[in-house]
């Protein structure tokens, strides 16, 4: 290990700064509704050279989805916590990593009942984590995944929202230890939805498709960016639709995507499966992503 790499790792280990409601803190009250009931939502954002490349998209999603959970927050409240943590990290000479924003319904209420609107005080926290060590290698060489036995329940009211209730993903992730990089999750009605940590795009004989998320799954920021801009910039067409597990076996190209890892090719599904080539379309989309906002180099 080089001296500079060792220094960075030491800095990352010491970077425990986290903000809660605009102040340095490392814990939440025991009666916080996020911990008690999962009453909240979160964003996981890439920090690159002291900036959050997709900050606007993450903020917009939080502000859009919070009211569905009965949580009222403002853009100014979010900015206070995000800017405070970035400033503190800058003082520690940390300019790259992962920032996690958690918004809960705060404390109060009786049982499941939320606190009255007049006294409701949502809580916002911001945390820093170092980048995953394998992130660039996975973008370059791809990942091997499995199909999870656990089935995602259908919930059209909460579908798409990145809420704090992640027990479905915890259950699915417990199905393997280290032999796979991720797992593909299928819904209760036997439709491919996403992986345990990312969205999916599949190139079939009919063209590119990403699973429809009206009944289950998370509408990721990176997924939306691909749909809105990156596919068209690469001269490619894409649609949202139903994808069956059997269709994955005939995929010409396949990748997962998230706002931290970017576009990650999937080169094999299941142990012993034939390798799937990393296609030109996937490489073109990776290039367009890097051109668009940086921080996702291969």
Image (cartoon, helix red, strand yellow):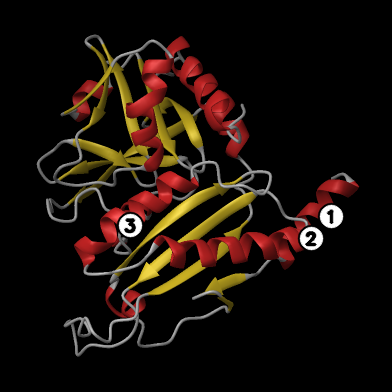
Q: Is residue 190 left or right of residue 8?
A: left
Q: Is residue 49 left or right of residue 254?
A: right
Q: Residues within 10 Å of mark 2 (few under 14, many from 20)?
A: few
Compared across the picture, whether 119 is left or right of 242 comes to right
Disc number lying in front (2 or 3): 3
- Circle 3 residues within 10 Å: few <14, some 14–19, many ≥20: some
The residue where tag 1 is placed is 7
Residue 271 in view (yes/no)? no
Quick check: 73 left or right of 247? right
Q: CA distance from mark 2 to mark 3?
A: 35 Å
Which label is found at residue 287? none
Pinpoint residue 295: horizontal percent, then vertical percent. 61, 36
User: Callout 1: 10 Å neighbours few (<14), some, many (20+)?
Assistant: few
Secondary-structure class at tag 2: helix
Residue 13's place in the image compared with 200, above or below, is below
Residue occupying image coordinates x 87% and y 44%: 2
Disc 3: which residue = 63
| Mark before the other along the chain sequence, 2 or 3 | 2
């Amino acid at each position: 290990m080089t001296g500079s790499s060792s220094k960075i790792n030491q800095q990352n280990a010491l970077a425990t700064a986290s903000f809660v409601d605009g102040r340095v803190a490392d814990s939440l009250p025991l009666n916080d509704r996020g911990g008690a009931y999962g009453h909240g939502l979160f964003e996981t954002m890439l920090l690159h050279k002291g900036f959050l490349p997709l900050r606007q998209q993450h903020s917009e999603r939080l502000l859009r989805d919070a009211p569905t959970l009965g949580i009222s927050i403002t853009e100014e409240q979010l900015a206070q916590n995000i800017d405070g943590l970035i400033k503190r990290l800058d003082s520690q000479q940390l300019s790259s990593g992962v920032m996690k924003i958690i918004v809960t319904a705060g404390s109060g209420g009786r049982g499941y009942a939320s606190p009255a609107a007049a006294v409701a005080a949502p809580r916002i926290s911001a945390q820093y984590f170092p980048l995953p060590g394998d992130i660039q290698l996975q973008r370059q060489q791809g990942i091997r995944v499995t199909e999870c036995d656990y089935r995602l329940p259908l919930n059209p009211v909460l579908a798409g929202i990145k809420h704090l209730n992640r027990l479905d993903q915890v259950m699915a992730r417990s199905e393997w230890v280290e032999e796979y990089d991720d797992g593909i999750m299928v819904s209760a009605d036997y439709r491919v939805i996403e992986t345990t940590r990312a969205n999916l795009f599949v190139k079939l004989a009919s063209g590119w498709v990403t699973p429809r998320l009206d009944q289950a799954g998370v509408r990721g920021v990176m997924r939306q960016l691909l749909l809105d801009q990156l596919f068209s910039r690469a001269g490619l067409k894409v649609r949202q639709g139903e994808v069956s597990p059997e269709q994955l076996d005939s995929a010409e190209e396949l990748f997962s995507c998230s706002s931290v890892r970017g576009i990650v090719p999937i080169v094999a599904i299941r142990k012993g499966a034939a390798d799937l080539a990393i296609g030109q379309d996937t490489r073109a989309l990776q290039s367009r992503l890097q051109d668009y906002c940086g921080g996702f180099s291969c």
